[in-house]
Amino acid sequence: MTRPLTTLRILSWNIHKGVGGVDRRYDLGRVADVLARLEPDLALLQEVAQGMPSLRGDDQVQRLGALDGLFRHAEFHPEHQFRRGGYGNLILSRYPLHDPEHLDLTIGVRKKRGLVKTHVVIRHDEHQRTLVVHNMHLGLAGSERARQLQRFLESEPFRGIHHSTPIIVGGDLNDLWGGLGPKFLAPAGFQRAGKLENTFPAMFPLRPLDGLFYRGDMRLIDAGVARDAQAKAASDHLPIWADFELPVAF
């Protein structure tokens, strides 16, 4: 019997705390407008702020999670905490999120980095499927990124996940030359969602810093980078997106 299919749009974007990459103006509404237009089912966002005085003290987790008709569930982990406020990684979802975990990716005395992971339970009629999602923000040095990805790939429970389980790994990988996928993720069974494309700086992209990778029982339909004027104005990174077809288990 043929299993039912459901389609899923996944987006990854470093929103730069809602500060435009060109005009340096804080306007979270621009980020919200881009998300509303792209209509992702899952959004992996980096540099999402809470309570920072320079950003009007906004709780961006609450504001973005409350976008009308878009998301119902959120999982956030702050990576950088200051005396007042901080910022970190956020997963927004139309579907329920379960079993959240955080993996510390900080290397030595370098800037604090991390990964937030959760299980997305996707229901289709009377059936359901679980997708394991990882949202990460890696460091600026090549040796740092290598150790961070090795730590992730050697972590539990990732090492115990069955090869057919649908898995997403995405985020701001600070991947200057696009080599992290072939070197680290491809040997672990991951494929890049779409072709390697430059995403930074947003106005005139020169580097493929951001990435979305997938593994397991799911099929890529389409993928791309939002390059319109609105996306270029909202952050210093461009959002990347991918559409998948996911068989739903009986």
Image (cartoon, rainbow, N blue to C red):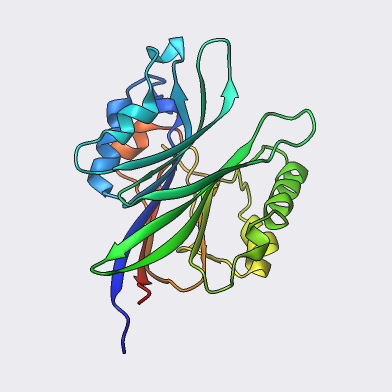
Residue drawn at (31%, 86%), measured in percent from left and top? 2
Tell me which corner region of the image, top left, top right, bottom left or bottom right, holds residue 244.
bottom left
* 56 and 217: which is toward the camera: 217
**33 horizontally vs 116: left or right:** left
**What's the residue at 70%, 53% (across, down)?**
155
Image quadrant in which you'd find residue 30: top left
Between 137 and 3, which is closer to the camera in this rendering? 3
**Residue 31 visible within the image:** no
Q: Nearer the viewer, residue 60 or 248?
A: 248
Which quarter of the image is occupied by the N terminus?
Answer: bottom left
Q: Given the current orientation, which residue lies at the most extreme left position? A: 69
Which residue, as the protein is rendered here, is positioned at the far front? 126
203 sits left or right of 208 in the view:
left
Give above or below for 4 relative to 45.
below
Can residue 42 be seen at all in this image of the molecule?
A: yes
Q: Decide: is 126 above or below 23.
A: below
Expressed as whole percent of the image width and height from the top left, the position of residue 61 reads 39, 30
Query: Toward which corner of the image does residue 48 lie, by quadrant?
Result: top left
Residue 218, given in percent of the width and then of the height, sits at 43, 71
Q: Which residue lies at the image location 72% right of the left edge and 39% below the top edge?
A: 141
Q: Is residue 248 above or below residue 115?
A: below
Count the numbered circles shown: 0
Residues 79 and 145: in front is 79
> Residue 87: percent from the left, percent from the top?
51, 26
| Quarter containing the C terminus | bottom left
- Residue 228 percent location from the top left of the image: 30, 43
Which residue occupies the extreme right position in the image? 108
Give the residue drawn at x 59%, y 25%.
80
